[in-house]
Image (spheres, helix red, strand yellow):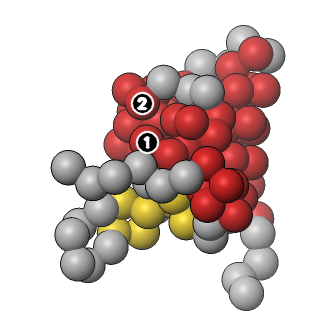
């Protein structure tokens, strides 16, 4: 079992684990796992130990966006469609 990183380190890290996202967003692990499995929360797979790593800033923004849309009464399929349309409209870097 790995040791938890300090709160100050997590808040400054470029990438975080799903457990650290739970701490940052106060959203349940099972909810974040569901969002990940549904393709609503992108991640990168770390090669060395196959740990999923999430971009801290982008993931927090995405979770806040999903929470806001849920607060408006949107269903998960509706939110997925909105997120996919938004991603399709973004210019490639």
Q: Nearer the viewer, residue 6 or 55?
A: 6
Between the residue at mark 2 and the residue at mark 1, the CA separation in whole angstroms equals 7 Å
Could you say where residue 92 lies in the image, as x and y percent from the top left? 71, 83
Task: Name the mark on residue 46.
Answer: none
1 with respect to 6 (left or right): left
Q: Secondary structure at mark 2?
A: helix
Please identify the quarter of the rendering in which residue 52 is found: bottom left
| Residue 33 seen in the current view | yes
| Residue 85 seen in the current view | no
Q: Residues within 10 Å of mark 1 (few under 14, many from 20)?
A: some
Could you say where residue 75 lies in the image, as x and y percent from the top left? 60, 19
Q: Nearer the viewer, residue 18 or 2?
A: 2
2 with respect to 30 (left or right): left
Question: Looking at the picture, does residue 45 appear above or below residue 92?
Answer: above
Could you say where residue 40 lies in the image, as x and y percent from the top left? 52, 45
All told, the count of numbered labels is 2
Q: Nearer the viewer, residue 7 or 58?
A: 7
66 with respect to 29 (left or right): right
The residue labelled by disc 1 is: 19
Could you say where residue 17 lies in the image, as x and y percent from the top left? 44, 54
Please identify the quarter of the rendering in which residue 47 is found: bottom left
Please identify the quarter of the rendering in which residue 91 is found: bottom right
Q: Residues within 10 Å of mark 2 (few under 14, many from 20)?
A: some
Instruction: Residue at 79% x, 16% y: name it.
Output: 72
Instruction: Residue at 70% x, 27% y: name it.
Output: 67
Question: Looking at the picture, does residue 38 appear above or below residue 87?
Answer: above
Marked residue nearer the N-terminal end (2 or 1) = 1
Task: Name the mark on residue 29.
Answer: 2
Instruction: Residue at 63% x, 40% y: name it.
Output: 24
């Amino acid at each position: 079992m790995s040791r938890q990183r300090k709160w100050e380190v997590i808040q400054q890290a470029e990438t975080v684990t799903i457990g650290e996202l739970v701490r940052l967003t106060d959203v349940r692990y099972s909810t974040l796992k569901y969002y990940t499995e549904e393709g609503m929360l992108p991640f990168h797979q770390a090669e060395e130990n196959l740990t999923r790593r999430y971009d801290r800033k982008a993931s927090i923004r995405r979770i806040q966006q999903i929470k806001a849309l849920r607060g408006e009464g949107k269903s998960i399929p509706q939110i997925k469609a909105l997120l996919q349309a938004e991603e399709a409209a973004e210019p490639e870097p």
